[in-house]
Image (tube, rainbow, N blue to C red):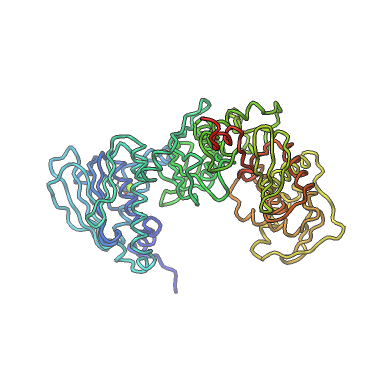
């Protein structure tokens, strides 16, 4: 085929693909326009998951009659005038693309009346051709009706998910904006039925319920502005450690009122819960970040759902520290701390008594506890003000239960110790100590060659230096083979290849940008692999040895992943349970 310039209708459709991916993207663009027009009330009506009809009506500023066809042109916008404006975007839209894109793939009717005109104007666009402007009587504001979405690009229709999924996406968009703009009234109707209503009262917690559910919204903690907050402010809500989800999807982020997706900031929220959540559990959060417009570039992608920060690290740290300090100051943080000590599902008063009883026994050591491993944040509240440095009293081992738990007695009651979790903790602290003393690595008498799946080989290759810091000497051995020449002391006696595989798995799941944090997670992963398992019977000497090593740990009560190593049945609790005390 010869090279030729594409006709404008075709370039319009190609460009539209980036802005209008699915019905929910249309809803998002129309909501953003309404919000940019300072609407106080926005109604969204949907038919057939948005493919048949999407109508958005607002009571905003409106469009002057003489400009109504211009609004539908590509790169026509009232929000930008010159290049410098791009550095200070205060509106949600600015590219002048949305209406044109939508109009190139659907039948669009735009009707609007600006507040200072007596009558409104209406125009219909279909297949790129704009009809005549007609006068209409209407209250001030704008209505955009989008019909037969993607009729002009049938291929796109085939890629849509089920009606239910597309509908769910639309609900997600509306509820997120309802949360970001609590002073605006949102009403979403699907197939003539009301699905979502927000009052516009300005109460964010009320809007929170529409996103996370009523019960969850009630429990969520409002983020406290920490005293060290600078020009980056972080507000919003985060779940207490007792309220979790199995994925990160309910960590919702907004930057200067714009809903964005950002893996690093999501990780910042998750990290704030370090040691407070079980492995595989994630918090829920709605995080609103405000910062000077010149600090953030929103012109990264046509859909405007990603942004770039001038100083990503500062934003990361502001989010992580604000959430962490809220958790630590809240009663929930204390309860979480206490339940870390006594095991989950513990009765409330036992948590309280543990919380009161334990700090008295805390050792005055000043070294940071290994699992207080939130990234070093100068000036932030020590993450573990309540958790750290709680050494165990001397315990007398009574025996093993189910080849999994060790029962022990202390001056203040009974302890049920999870042997696997306890051993993980012991190994973890030993590893860190040896790393500090630069004596972790031990050459192997007979180096072992092993192979990893091709997909993992590159990953492993890229991280050999990280592994060296952890005491592994691994060399490429051709193709996807590697040779292990030295391993950490800890791994001595265990299968070295297993330990390396554990590390590679962790690389695959890795989501933290912080090297220090990453190392700790790798170490935790190795310890988990090497530790004695549940179901393994131990001699009484082995039991005693494990418990006495646990006694000398800095954070004996949780494993490196944050799970409890033990359940403590205090004397007081036992007396209460047996009715010896009121
Ligand atoms: P952008 O929002 O990037 O400027 P759009 O294509 O979404 O581009 O909209 C083009 C222009 O049409 C906007 O700049 C605005 O002036 C006008 N407009 C669109 N929707 C509305 C609305 N709901 N209320 C008032 N003006 C609107
Ligand atoms: Mg727009």
Left-right relation of 445 to 89: right
- Give the percent coordinates (x, y) of residue 149: 29, 61
Decide: is 314 above or below 422. Answer: above
Left-right relation of 109 to 545: left
Q: Quadrant of residue 141?
A: top left
Left-right relation of 51 to 418: left
Q: Quadrant of residue 358?
A: top right
Name the one closer to the observer, 581 or 78.
581
The residue shown at (75%, 64%) is: 450
- Give the percent coordinates (x, y) of residue 36: 31, 41
Give the farthest residue toward the bottom: 1
The residue shown at (28%, 38%) is: 200
Count of residue discs: 0
Name the one closer to the observer, 396 or 389.
396
Give the farthest residue toward the right: 445
- Give the percent coordinates (x, y) of residue 371: 65, 39
Left-right relation of 247 to 47: right
Name the one closer to the observer, 502 or 142.
502
Residue 320 visible in rendering: yes
Name the one closer to the observer, 564 or 499.
564
Q: Quadrant of residue 570?
A: top right
The residue shown at (72%, 59%) is: 498
Decide: is 228 above or below 82. Answer: above
- Give the percent coordinates (x, y) of residue 28: 34, 50
Which quadrant holds the N terminus? bottom left
Residue 146 visible in rendering: no
């Amino acid at each position: 085929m010869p090279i030729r310039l594409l006709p404008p209708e075709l370039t319009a459709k190609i460009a539209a693909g980036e802005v209008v991916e699915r019905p929910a993207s249309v809803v998002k663009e129309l909501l953003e326009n309404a919000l940019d027009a300072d609407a106080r009330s926005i109604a969204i009506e949907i038919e057939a998951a948005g493919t048949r009809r999407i109508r958005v009506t607002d009571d905003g500023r409106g469009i002057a009659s003489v400009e109504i066809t211009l609004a539908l042109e590509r790169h026509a916008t009232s929000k930008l005038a010159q290049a410098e404006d791009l550095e200070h975007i205060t509106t949600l839209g600015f590219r002048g693309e949305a209406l044109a894109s939508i109009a190139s793939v659907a039948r669009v009717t735009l009707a609007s009346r600006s507040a200072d005109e007596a009558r409104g104007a209406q125009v219909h666009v279909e297949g790129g051709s704009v009809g005549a402007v007609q006068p209409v009587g209407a209250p001030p504001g704008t209505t955009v009706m989008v019909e037969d979405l993607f009729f002009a690009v049938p291929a796109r229709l085939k890629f849509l998910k089920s009606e239910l999924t597309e509908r769910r996406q639309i609900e997600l968009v509306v509820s997120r904006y309802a949360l970001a703009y609590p002073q605006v009234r949102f009403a979403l109707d699907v197939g003539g039925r009301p699905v979502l209503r927000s009052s516009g009262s300005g109460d964010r917690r009320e809007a929170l319920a529409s996103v996370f559910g009523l019960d969850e919204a009630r429990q969520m903690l409002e983020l406290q502005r920490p005293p060290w907050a600078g020009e980056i402010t972080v507000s919003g809500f985060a779940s207490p450690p007792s309220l979790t989800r199995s994925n990160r999807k309910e960590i919702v982020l907004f930057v200067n009122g714009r809903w964005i997706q950002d893996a690093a900031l999501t990780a910042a929220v998750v990290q704030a819960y370090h040691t407070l959540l079980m492995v595989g559990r994630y918090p829920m959060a709605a995080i609103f970040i405000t910062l000077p417009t010149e600090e953030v570039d929103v012109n990264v992608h046509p859909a405007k759902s990603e942004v770039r920060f001038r100083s990503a690290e500062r934003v990361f740290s502001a989010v992580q520290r604000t959430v962490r300090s809220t958790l630590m100051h809240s009663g929930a943080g204390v309860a979480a701390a206490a339940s870390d000590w006594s095991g989950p599902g513990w009765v409330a008063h036992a948590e309280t008594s543990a919380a009161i009883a334990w700090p008295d026994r805390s050792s005055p050591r000043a070294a940071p506890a290994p699992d207080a491993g939130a990234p070093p944040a100068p000036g932030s509240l020590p993450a573990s003000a309540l958790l750290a440095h709680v050494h165990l009293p001397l315990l007398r081992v009574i025996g093993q239960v189910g080849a999994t738990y060790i029962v022990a007695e202390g001056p203040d009651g009974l302890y049920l110790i999870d042997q696997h979790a306890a051993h993980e903790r012991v190994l973890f602290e030993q590893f860190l100590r040896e790393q500090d003393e630069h004596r972790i690595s031990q050459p192997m008498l007979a180096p072992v060659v092993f192979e990893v799946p091709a997909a993992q080989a590159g990953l492993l290759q890229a991280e050999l230096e990280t592994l060296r810091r952890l005491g592994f000497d691994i060399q490429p051995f051709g193709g996807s083979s590697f040779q292990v020449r030295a391993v950490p002391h800890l791994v001595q006696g265990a299968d070295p290849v297993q330990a390396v595989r554990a590390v590679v798995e962790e690389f695959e799941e890795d989501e933290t940008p912080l090297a220090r944090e990453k190392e700790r997670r790798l170490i935790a992963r190795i310890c988990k692999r090497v530790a004695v398992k549940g179901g393994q019977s131990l001699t009484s000497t082995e039991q005693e040895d494990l418990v006495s090593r646990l006694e000398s740990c800095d954070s004996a009560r949780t494993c490196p992943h944050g799970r409890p190593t033990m359940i403590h049945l205090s004397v007081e609790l036992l007396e209460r349970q047996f009715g010896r005390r009121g």
